[in-house]
Image (spheres, helix red, strand yellow):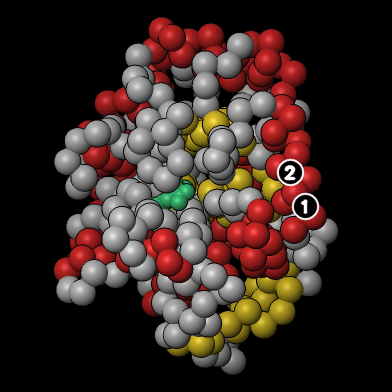
Amino acid sequence: MKTVTLTMPLDMHVHLRDGDMLKIVAPLTSYTFSGALVMPNLVPPITTKEMVKEYRSRIKAAMESDDFEPYMTLFYQNFSREFLESVQDDITAIKIYPSGATTNSQGGVVSFDIEPMRETLEAMSDFGIVLCVHGETQGFVMDREAEFMSVYEKLAINFPKLKIIMEHITTREAVEMLDRHPNLYATITVHHLMITLDDVAGGMLRPHLFCKPIAKRPHDRDALLKIALQAHPKVMFGSDSAPHPKHAKESCGCGAGVFTAPIALQLLCEIFQEHNALDNLQAFVSDNAQRIYGICAEYKEVVLVERDFVVPEIYADVVPMRAGETLTWSIERVD
Ligand code: NCD
Ligand code: ZN
């Protein structure tokens, strides 16, 4: 049977939540990943050094293994240079959300005018703190990401030393933006490599595939696939695994988020194998992220085997993507 060994897989965009949900999902991520960039959109959002430290401790306590590093983030505010200097060793990145763009983003920014952000972004450049961006405007839902490209350009030009990550990109426009500025990078989810809007709403509505940014058109998915499969040096895997309780997804007013943490590596093997690109998977799920972020991940070896895996219908209270379906790759062991 065919096997693939991945060393130190990293998930550079994950939602681990807090409380009971953290206890459900954290062990699923820490089982197969060496580390993950943990999003700060809790209620209330993570905005102080104490909150970062306490959240990190709760994550560590919820893990079932010690060989996992939660890379912590702050929820963007116009932080002072003094504050950033004091917190630089506790965080890896700061995540900026446009206000109201997605789940728990109400405290995000209302404008991307440069001047009010200058002190913060210059200090982040100086301290090597990465800026992760949820890049969507308030426009028509299918155009929000493409319309945001001018903001990425403005940020990249004004802060050339700042590493800027275009999070969970979903469009051809974002793929084309990647090589225009040396300080722009991107994460790509596994679901956006697989689905388009048709899968979400083209037939029966499938709430478990509803997320922000919404899945786009076939040509967008193909553009994402192309750079992921070649493990373009400026892209890395970020699942954006975003658990919501079953009742909140299967309801009127379904929350945005797809839960993929326990099946992400299996799905990636399927996709990369289908396109004869398994040799590039290691770079996509680990090497690129380590280089872009300058991190040295905890040692972990994950062996996957080409053997059927039936996805559980539910993990405690959370329905995963592909629930009840059979995947063609399984986790064989983790060393
Ligand atoms: C995320 C969540 O639920 O926190 N939802 C999502 O659809 N991706 C937030 C986000 O990353 O946009
Ligand atoms: Zn996210």
Query: In the orientation shown, which residue stands out farthest toward the right?
Result: 66
* Percent x, y of residue 114: 39, 12
Tell me the amino acid under the disc marked 1. Answer: Lys
- Per the rendering, the mark at residue 60 is 1
Is disc 2 placed on a helix, strand or loop?
Answer: helix
Q: Around disc 1, counting alpha carbons within 10 Å, would you say few (fewer than 14), some (14 to 19), or many (20 or more)?
A: some
Q: Quadrant of residue 130?
A: top right
Relative to 147, is 198 above or below?
below
Q: Quadrant of residue 321?
A: bottom left
Q: Residue at x 46, y 13 (%)?
A: 117
Is the shortest distance between ligand 1 and the CB of mark 1 under 8 Å? no
**Gap between marks 2 and 1, in whole Å?**
6 Å
Tell me the amino acid under the disc marked 2. Answer: Arg
Relative to 164, is 298 above or below?
below
Q: Residue at x 59, y 92 (%)?
A: 1
Q: Is residue 45 left or right of residue 54?
A: left
Q: Residue at x 75, y 60 (%)?
A: 63
Q: Is residue 77 left or right of residue 57?
A: left
Q: Nearer the viewer, residue 228 or 130?
A: 130
* Res. 29 visible in picture: no
* Percent x, y of residue 270: 45, 76
Quadrant of the drawing holding the C terminus: bottom right
Q: Is residue 328 left or right of residue 178?
A: right
* Percent x, y of residue 132: 50, 35
* Percent x, y of residue 303: 67, 76
Say if mark 2 contacts mark 1, CB within 8 Å: yes
- Residue picked out by circle 2: 56
Q: Residue at x 71, y 42 (%)?
A: 55
